[in-house]
Image (cartoon, coloured by chain):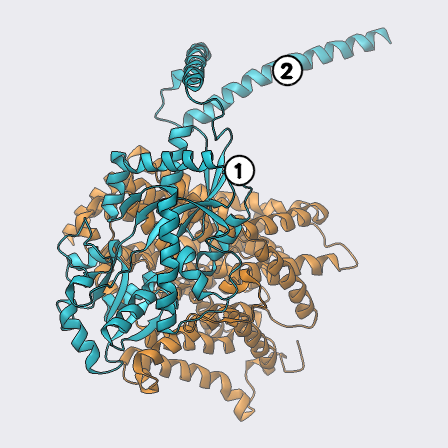
Chain colours: A orange, B cyan
Amino acid sequence: MIETFNSLMMGFSVAFQPEVLMYAFFGCIIGTLVGMMPGLGPLAGISLLLPATFGLNPIIAIVLLAGVYYGAMYGGSTTSILMRIPGEAASVMTCVDGYAMTQQGRAGPALAIAAIGSFVAGTLGVIGLMLMAPTLASFALRFGPPEYTALLLMGLFVLAYMSGGSMLKTLAMAVLGLLLGMIGIDVMSGYTRFSFDIVELGDGVGIVPVAVGLFGISEILLTAGQADPPKVQQPTLRQLVPTKADLKLSVGPIMRGSVLGFMIGIIPGSAHIISSFVSYGIERRLSKHPELFGNGAIEGVAGPESANNAAATGAFVPMLALGIPTGPVTAVMLAAIMVHGILPGPMLIQQQPDLFWGFVASMYVGNVVLLVLNLPMVGLFVNLLRIPYAYLYPCILAFCILGCYSVSNSTMDVWIMLVMGGIGYVLRKFGFDLAPVALGLVLGPMLELSLRQSLAMSGGDYMIFLQRPIAVTMLVLGLVLLGLALKPLIFKSKDWRSSVGLDENVD
Amino acid sequence: MRSRTRTRLGRSRGIMHDVNALSSGDGLYRAGSMGTMFAFIPSRIFKQGYFMKMFALSFCLGISMLLLAFGSLAQSQPPTFPVRPMKLIVPFAPGGPNDILGRLVGQKLTEQWGQQVIVENRGGAGGTIGLEAAARLPKDGYGIAMGGTSNLAVAPSLYEKLTYDPVRDFTPVINVALVPYAVALNPTVPAKTVKELIPIAAKKAGFLSYGSSGMGSMSSLAAELFNAMAKTDILHVPYKGTAPALTDVVSGQIDMMFADLSLIKPHASVGKLRAVGVTSAKRVVSSPDIPTIAESGLPGYDISPWFGVVAPEGIPKPVVTRLNTAIAGSLKSPDVIQRLGALGYEPIGGTSEQFTATIRSDIGKYAKIVKTAGIKADL
């Protein structure tokens, strides 16, 4: 403990060097701006900035990139809440209730809670990382393809809790998402599916263009289709601050989201994306007023936002403790230090203590910087809503196209986004909920790959899922969740859906 | 009327005055903000007198540098090739060996020629999307790309509908570096050498499993060549990328993997992985203690993934030579040798013709491996 404390102090002495501090600030600001660009998420942000770090020393490089990373995580919530445009997959859930709050003139509290939740989750995450990184990392390594399959199945079962509308419509949308996820090269066989000879579709349909299209573009189209222009909001100062009731409602979701996000975050792979979906599902299930979800429930912002920031920190655990890049973002960050001739590996913490502790300390600093930076900015951001829609929407559209294009310099992504915008418009006109599409698209390819990897490992024997304790536990948990969700359908008993007037026929 | 005009005039003068005040104030303001941004620069630099002096000084310096530059230009051949910024396409996402090497080449060319080389990542479809874009670049040498064994030599036999022809559509410029691959075992596999590995793998079909970064990737081809030559049947578990696959070898979910040696080494040094053989024909300079697979039981086994610069077909010969000379020269500079050495990459260099020959012979070589392994991807 004392050793940890001493090391942390050493870390702070690194992090408080003026140069390091300056780059941490810099990273947070760039990250926030990048995150606010529709379609540009943390991965795009740090990929774009990576070349600029080659001239810096490795500590500064990683501090800068980490700043961009969680800055973008913060910033992503801003556009989701204000304009219903998810900056990345993790903020899809924030769009739903965050934007509903904006429409009720409560954008201020939503933004503030998102910032506070992110701060708490980020800080708890760093504490977890600092105290338990090596232990957690060895636990994370027990996650092979079978465990992954079980986890993703559990994520799929959460679907049942995600939507307030008709169960049939929710499942239809999830299937649409899963189908979209089938497009592209099949990793197992190398064959291309549903790409219609379009080379760019070989890598599949990205979640970012789909999410921006379904949520953002469709919103613009819907607004344009209204007979009367929506009233421009004039938020007053009092409306900017979350009320006591808001804060009280958010404490639980923030804490649960933090723990859940961190645990999912340390698992190698891209599972961290599902943390915000799972958190949303859980909060909805636990809430006394599930009918408010989707119509501006603050818990629906607090939970997922905390979960995705905690997951972002959790992802650093295996990266630092084992030198293993567990997802695309951490891979780019490791590349940034590899360029300097530091080969990341299990000895990274021992061999580069300055790097590790400086990085940990800079994350504490970064989280404070982001809170300080973002809370006062809430007022500024909310004032964006004062811009008349005739000017605001063309700008948003332009930024969406720009952001989508710059992720991988591909015009195909822009087309996908626009087509999805059209599809999203039609689906929303018919009262379909779109969040399950995003979840399906995220889960589909991962689930398929890990299922088939597991079967490749066992030679086609399904028993592999029952021989591994973690996998079994999660499958049972998932089945219980599924059972609870199906119970009202099977026994025709009344669940909250009907008791609040949300029936199969009512949307 | 008159008085009104006067007031107007007066006002406009006042405004003029204000404008002046504003502009100087603006300067001060900027200086102020810059002062906070670059707090480590003493603030007196931003004071105007000092600033003017600095400006004059740097202006003189700049002019003299320009004169010097022109002087050296006059000595060399008159039409020098890069007169404007260049573009280098890296057909993979940032972070991998292709990206690292591409950016290194870009940086070195920028340093030598003083023209910015803009690196553009165009990832996707195993590096073929970026090369397709590169094949369509203008034929003037201002657009080049960093290719590799996978998308220049393997792709033609792997993808039926490949939209470019590596031989016909490109002018090879220079082979930049060899990125050594090695076979890494999880330490629970009871084999210390490749010789011991072969009988264990041959004992029972599907007894051992290997991970790869995808069907048809270099790592899967290296393993399939191993399977074919050693007459083993090691089970293939493909992943999406090298990192997740290597993670699962470290954790023991799968038994082995053929991967970039620089990624294996840190784990091997602490006993989390066991590097039993390198895939190239010769031992790797940075790890001379690891034997080659060829010398430990499979003579003739050779997978040597390289990365090199190509330009669109039909660019002027002098431009190719100039690019080749510049990159070849930088591959001999101490800092490049040191940076590549830290990663275990081995500079290759050589002429454009040598690179052409390598690409041609490797296309034939991998066609055979792909055929024996029965891999086919219809892109």
Labels 1 and 2: the sequence-earlier one = 2
Image coordinates for residue A499, horizontal then vertical, percent? 59, 82
Q: Quadrant of residue A426?
A: bottom right
Q: Are marks 1 and 2 in contact (CB under 8 Å)?
A: no
Q: Quadrant of residue B181?
A: bottom left
Check disc 1 and report the residue beneath it: B140
Q: Is A351 on the left or on the right of A116, as rendered?
A: left
Instruction: Give amino acid for label 1.
Output: Asp
Check disc 2 and report the residue beneath it: B18
Instruction: Give amino acid for label 2.
Output: Asp
Image coordinates for residue A3, horizontal then vertical, percent? 14, 51
Q: Foreground mark, 1 or 2?
A: 1
Residue farthest bottom in this picture:
A491
Q: Is A47 on the left or on the right of A12, as rendered?
A: right
Label 1, secondary structure: give it.
loop
What residue is shown at x 32% (from left), y 34% (from top)?
B329
Q: Nearer the viewer, residue A482 or B5?
A: A482
What residue is shown at x 33% (from left), y 52% (from top)?
B306
State the quadrant of the N terminus of chain A.
bottom left
Q: Nearer the viewer, residue A428 or A112?
A: A428
Label 2, secondary structure: give it.
helix
Are there few (<14), some (14-19), or many (20+) residues within 10 Å of tag 2?
Answer: few
Above or below, B243 relative to B107:
below
Above or below, A145 relative to B16:
below
